[in-house]
Image: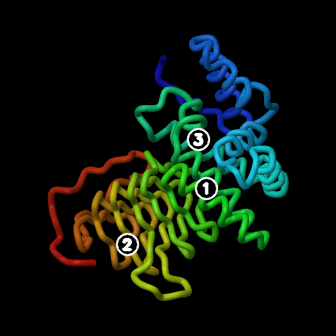
Amino acid sequence: MAKLEVVAETGTDSVWRQLRASAEAASREEPQLGSQMNAVILSHDDLAGALSFQIARKLADGEMSAMSVREVCLSAFKADATMVEAAEADLQAVAERDPAIRNLLQPFLYFKGFQALQGWRVAHWLWGQGRETLAFHFQSRISELFQLDIHPAAQLGKGLFLDHGTGIVIGETAVVGDDVSMLHNVTLGGTGAERGDRHPKIGKGVLLGAGAKVLGNIHVGDYAKVASGSVVLKDVPSGCTVAGVPARLVNCPTNAEPARTMDHTLAEVVYDFVI
């Protein structure tokens, strides 16, 4: 199957057309999956319908049927159309940043980082409606199924790429800006048992490498880069790269948009001071 060519045209309608075309092609190439393609994608009129079905078939359990989960999702999408727009931006982010992707069908059906993020968006909407118990139920199911734990009260932007997804933990008062990329085992956590505003604030376009731990109510500036395995305990200036335990500045400024380029390399010159 050919590598996906990301088209210049954007928007939910464009993503929906690409997704349907990929599902139709998959049905022809793998007839055994034809019923799945039809049920999840081809039988629906728009991205919201297909997305609600996909979330429901994943998160349904003995407490909530797939029909009940889907009703919640559709209510959320109807009340806040920006949720579907965010899902479209997340799909585009995967298409632009993941060199392994072949088409939009992959993240939509099979990538748990994308699927967990869309389930979280519904949980976050429930939290905003004061339906905290159901929001926690969604969080629990997402954690059990996908091995990602994102508190429903956290604030996450759009155009996010959660690569692999396994082990990502994002705390209650964390904020993540638009166009951020993070790999597996990233933690946006607190530093103890304190209450209140206690989690990191991640700026726009930040790249968080695998296993990075950003702890406490600190700020990582726009377009900064946190190297894999780093432990960040202090603010990171915009456009800078940090690495190590504890994290140290290793490059300022770094490349312009690290989350988009997914460039995990480090500068050869090391500035020997702790941030």
The kind of residue on which mark 1 rests is Arg
- Element marked by disc 3: helix
- In the picture, the disc for residue 215 is none
Q: Where is residue 5 in the image (x, y as percent from the top left)?
A: 52, 26
Pointer 3 residue: 91
Q: Position of residue 145 (x, y in %)?
A: 55, 50
The kind of residue on which mark 2 rests is Pro
Quadrant of the rendered image containing residue 138: bottom right
Q: Earlier in the sequence, mark 3 or mark 1?
A: 3
The kind of residue on which mark 3 rests is Leu
Q: Distance between the residues labelled 3 and 1?
A: 22 Å
Q: Where is residue 246 in the image (x, y as percent from the top left)?
A: 24, 74
Q: Can residue 85 be seen in this view?
A: yes
At 56% across and 58% down in the image, what residue appears? 178
Q: Is residue 257 visible?
A: no
Viewer-nearest of discs 3 and 2:
3
Quadrant of the rendered image containing residue 125: bottom right
Q: Do the residues labelled 1 and 2 touch (CB within 8 Å)?
A: no
Residue 124 shown left or right of residue 156 in the figure? right
Between 248 and 233, the residue placed more toward the observer is: 233
Pointer 1 residue: 141
Q: Are marks 3 and 2 in contact (CB under 8 Å)?
A: no
Q: Earlier in the sequence, mark 3 or mark 2?
A: 3
User: Mark 2: few, some, or many residues within 10 Å (few <14, many ≥20)?
Assistant: some
Q: Position of residue 185 (x, y in %)?
A: 38, 57
Pointer 2 residue: 237
Q: How far apart are marks 1 and 2 (CA)?
A: 36 Å
